[in-house]
Amino acid sequence: MRLRHARPRRSGGRHPHLHLCCSEAYVVTSGEGLVETLSLDGFARTPLRQGAVVWFTPGTIHRLVNHGGLQIVVLMQNSGLPEAGDAVLTFPQHLLDDPEAYAAAATLPDGGAPGSDLGAAFRRRDLAVEGFTVLAEAAKGVTSAR
């Protein structure tokens, strides 16, 4: 289990993604926002306020949105598994179909180190939101088969 504190950016939310191998939980310590999820149960928006605990399993696409001052404690089941080996960003289908194009879109200059190109991180986020939006729209109104 890995524990970290996070302050999601206010503009546009976090990169929608899923984890292949691990569960994840958020414990809200302050602020407000929501987490959007997409799973076999469909699309959901879960409000986040101080004291809320939200948990999801591997394969659940999720995205944090900060409505103001959102601070969370993130619990990850991965025990240090590198994100590059467990997280898949919800890019548009043409990028998911092409491993080289996916890698180019997902890779940040200098590994995303402080002082590197923030524009690249925002472009990556926007591509993931674009793909997530298509998936979420397709899931709306679909009844779970489970």
Image (cartoon, rainbow, N blue to C red):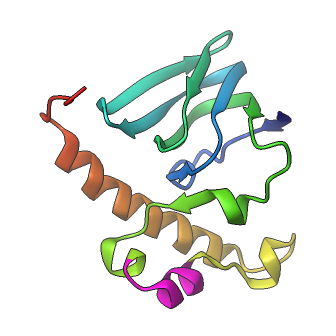
**Side of 19 where 137 appears, left or right:** left
Q: Quadrant of residue 143?
A: top left
Quarter of the image with the N terminus in it: top right
What residue sits 12% from the left and 34% below the top?
141
**Side of 113 where 11 appears, left or right:** left
**Extreme bottom residue here?**
100
Q: Is residue 118 magenta?
A: no
Q: Nearer the viewer, residue 31 or 40?
A: 40
Q: Nearer the viewer, residue 42 or 112?
A: 42
Q: Is residue 102 magenta?
A: yes
Place of residue 68 in the rendered image (x, y in percent of width and height, measured from the top left): 61, 31
What residue sits 54% from the left and 33% below the top?
57
What residue sits 68% from the left and 9% below the top?
51
**Extreme top residue here?**
51
Place of residue 61 in the rendered image (x, y in percent of width and height, measured from the top left): 46, 45
Q: Nearer the viewer, residue 125 or 37?
A: 37
What residue sits 39% from the left and 28% below the top?
45
Quarter of the image with the C terminus in it: top left
- Which segment did they paint magenta? 97-105
Place of residue 113 in the rendered image (x, y in percent of width and height, measured from the top left): 85, 72
Q: Main secondary structure of the magenta part?
A: helix
Place of residue 59 in the rendered image (x, y in percent of width and height, measured from the top left): 48, 44
**Side of 117 where 120 appears, left or right:** left
